């Protein structure tokens, strides 16, 4: 009987170990790093798209401000794309001289197109090779709130795109390029 107690007590001591082995800890740490890395990459892509969308909304807001200023002031106001990442807001005085009010710079994208985009989302213009379809890269709003010409400006950061479109009646809309097609926001 004493022999039996001794054998069973030694077996229980081996199974009653406390703590984890270094291998177990390394496996758990590896799994945490892999899951965290996947989450970080996914979050990074989502943040890039959200920043670009925010920039598109800011551009749409500037279009609206230009339109409203033209109507309130009773003179022509304009927004002109001057480079791949800058645009100016200006007005035309009574003599027709263009006066720049401010210059804005895109921080999360550039004016341009990505593969698959060949026209404005609303079909208002076919040539958007440089990301802008307005004549001379400028949209001018008349004092009655309508533009001289319709078109769009496309902001890209591969693989994402946001377009701000102005139709002939002066309506301003924002679109996002998702999975090969434009979606109105």
Image (tube, grey):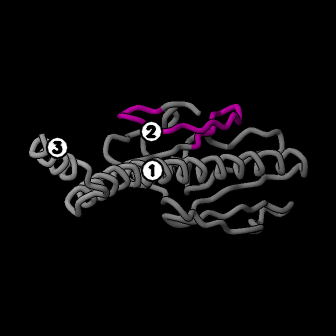
Left or right, 146 with reference to 151: right
Q: Considering the numbered disc 2 on the image, is that residue within a helix, a strand or a loop?
A: strand
Which residue in the protein does label 1 denote? 43
Residue 45 magenta-drawn? no
Q: CA distance from mark 1 to mark 3?
A: 59 Å
Residue 179 magenta-drawn? yes
**Which is nearer the eye, 54 or 72?**
54
Boundaries of the magenta span: 164-182
The residue under the point 70% across, 48% down is 63
* Quadrant position of the C terminus in the picture: top right
1 or 3: tag closer to the N-terminus? 3
Task: State the image coordinates of residue 65 (x, y, percent, origin top left).
Answer: 78, 50
The residue under the point 53% across, 64% down is 85
The residue under the point 64% across, 52% down is 59
Which residue in the protein does label 3 denote? 5
Q: CA distance from mark 3 to mark 2?
A: 75 Å
Which residue in the protein does label 2 denote? 177
- Classify 111 as above or below 99: above
Asked where in the image residue 86 lies, by quadrant, the reply is bottom right
Residue density around tag 1, few if under 14, some if 14–19, many if 20 or more, within 10 Å:
few
3 or 2: tag closer to the N-terminus? 3
Give the number of the mark in front: 3 or 2.
3
């Amino acid at each position: 009987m004493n022999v039996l107690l001794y054998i069973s007590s030694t077996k229980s001591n081996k199974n009653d170990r406390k703590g984890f082995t270094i291998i177990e800890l390394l496996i758990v740490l590896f799994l945490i790093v892999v899951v965290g890395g996947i989450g970080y990459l996914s979050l990074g892509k989502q943040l890039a798209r959200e920043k670009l969308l925010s920039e598109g909304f800011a551009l749409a807001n500037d279009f609206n401000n230009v339109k409203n200023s033209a109507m309130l002031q009773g003179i022509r106001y304009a927004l002109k794309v001057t480079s791949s990442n800058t645009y100016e807001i200006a007005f035309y005085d009574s003599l027709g001289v263009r006066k720049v009010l401010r210059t804005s710079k895109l921080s999360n994208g550039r004016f341009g197109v990505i593969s698959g985009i060949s026209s404005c989302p609303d079909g208002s213009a076919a040539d958007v090779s440089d990301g802008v379809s307005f004549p001379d890269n400028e949209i001018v709003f008349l004092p009655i709130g309508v533009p001289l010409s319709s078109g769009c400006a496309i902001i890209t950061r591969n693989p994402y795109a946001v377009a701000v479109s102005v139709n002939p009646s002066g309506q301003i809309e924002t679109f996002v390029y998702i999975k090969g097609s434009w979606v109105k926001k």
